[in-house]
Amino acid sequence: MTQPTLIRREGAHLRTALGLADRSVPVLPLRAGKVPFGNCPACKDNACGGRPNMKTPGPCHCPRPCHAWAAATTDPDVITGPAWAPVWKQAAAVAYHPGGIGLTVVDLDHADAIAWARRTLPATRTVPTTRGEHWIYRGAMTSANAVRDGVDIKSTMVYARWLGPGTGTVTALPDTVRALIVKEPSPVRPVTVAVPTGVGECRHRTPAYLERGIAMAEQRITQADSSVHATVYRTFLAVLSAHGRCGCLTDTHAARLFTAAQAKGESPRHCADAWSNARAALGM
């Protein structure tokens, strides 16, 4: 099917997506509920390590639009290609990756949040939303939800709905917004997880072999400076693959890995999800 034919058939969302892509804005389709389309067969039930709501991708490189912001693209051949073409008929909205073009969206969900922004933040481009406003600044930063009542930060590794160009001039991201995600470190909370109790042949010639493996895994997590969730999942997968079938891996070893992950900002729930996904991937 030619691109003009597809555009005529699939309508406004596809035209919007192609127009944004032509301006170097990475885009993706959203279904009803403001969420990406369901996982592809290779990543069913988040076997790739993605978080359960599908808003965060796992470590795989699947080309289909099932991995949220990581699927956003400016390539018209992908947008109108065979993997995405069937999706546009069902799409409810178009989303874009703000961090991918060096922007930050301050998502204000209600009137009180907007009033706070007007008192506190420098004027910039604003876009009306269903319940409030998006304030768009030039400059990328780490994303975070609920930084205060009714305020989310959407920039790197997230997507935002495209709701139109808005009004006003985009201004530089202020330190006031960056400071919203700086919090006092919270104590690490213990998490109970299932540790395999296999009876296979033990390949650990000495206790030092297992200890070295756990220490290396802790170091890999601690040194991650990006894609922390994906690094945690891959590390859990490697540890379970090497040490999880003979019964030598204990709750204490798992707790050490979870502690390292939580120190990098992973929540106990996301640690448990990554551990369960890794076990499932290995058939444990």
Image (cartoon, rainbow, N blue to C red):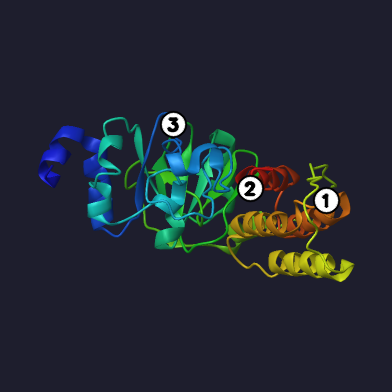
Residue occupied by mark 3: 130
**Label 2 environment density (alpha carbons within 10 Å; few <14, some 14–19, many ≥20):** some
Of residues 270 and 28, the one nearer the viewer is 270
Residue occupied by mark 1: 247
- Callout 2, which amino acid? Leu
| Residue sitting at x 27%, y 46% | 17
The first of marks 2 and 1 along the sequence is 1
Circle 2 SS class: loop
- Looking at this rendering, what residue extends furthest in the front direction? 201
Q: Is residue 81 left or right of residue 31?
A: left
- Callout 3, which amino acid? Thr
Q: Position of residue 253 (x, y in %)?
A: 84, 56
Q: Position of residue 120 (x, y in %)?
A: 59, 52
Quadrant that contains the C terminus: top right
Circle 1 SS class: loop
Res 86 quadrant in image: top left
Residue 137 in sight here: no
Q: Is residue 204 left or right of residue 9?
A: right
**Label 3 environment density (alpha carbons within 10 Å; few <14, some 14–19, many ≥20):** few
